[in-house]
Image: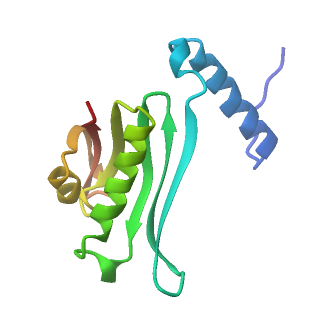
């Protein structure tokens, strides 16, 4: 057999890789968790319906993973991020998730997450040479 590696933006190939991994993973999870997947998209909009922040993530099996969480800089410290986070946590509870996981950089929101009960379970040093990359989790049980 002869194999080669390509570098192309092949959406069909990407879908194949994602689906094959998903199907493999399903074989290792209890039956009651199979098929538990949904995208979470929460948007903070102003009075003109302009997006000023939001959370993008997904419920997968028994957890919620927050992949992107942003609030415009001029709106920070007004409690809007907390409201967004609480809404995501409520969705996780309604979805019977056991925990939420996310990551943040040292110059982003470590203290914000810690204030809301998230704990660091891993850290990578020397990110961008001067920063740290934190992996965080909050148990919901």
Q: Quadrant of residue 26?
A: top right
> Residue 23 location in percent, x, y?
66, 21
Q: Is residue 103 above or below residue 30?
A: below
The scheme the figure's colours follow is rainbow
In the picture, measured across the screen, residue 27 lies left or right of residue 7, that is: left
Q: Residue furthest right?
A: 1
Q: Quadrant of residue 20?
A: top right
> Residue 101 location in percent, x, y?
35, 40
Q: Is residue 13 above or below residue 86?
A: above
Q: Residue furthest bottom?
A: 48
Write the residue at 33% across / 34% down: 99
Front in this rendered view, residue 77 or 9:
77
In the picture, measured across the screen, residue 137 lies left or right of residue 36, that is: left
Write the residue at 28% across / 75% down: 76
Quarter placement of the C terminus: top left
Write the residue at 22% across / 44% down: 118
> Residue 39 location in percent, x, y?
56, 46
> Residue 53 location in percent, x, y?
43, 70
Q: Is residue 73 above or below residue 5?
A: below
Quarter placement of the N terminus: top right
Write the residue at 66% across / 33% down: 18
Q: Residue furthest front?
A: 94
């Amino acid at each position: 057999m002869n194999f080669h590696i390509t570098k192309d933006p092949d959406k069909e190939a990407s879908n194949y890789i994602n689906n094959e991994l998903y199907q493999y993973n399903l074989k290792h999870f209890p039956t009651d968790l199979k098929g538990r997947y949904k995208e979470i998209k929460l948007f903070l909009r102003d009075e003109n319906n302009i997006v000023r922040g939001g959370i993008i993530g997904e419920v997968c099996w028994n957890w919620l993973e927050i992949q992107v969480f942003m609030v415009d800089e001029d709106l920070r410290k007004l409690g809007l991020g907390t409201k967004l986070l609480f809404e995501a946590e409520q969705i996780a509870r309604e979805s019977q998730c056991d925990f939420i996981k996310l990551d943040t950089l040292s110059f982003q929101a470590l203290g914000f997450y810690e204030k809301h009960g998230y704990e660091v379970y891993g850290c990578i040093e020397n990110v961008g040479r001067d920063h740290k990359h934190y992996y965080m989790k909050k148990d919901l049980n």
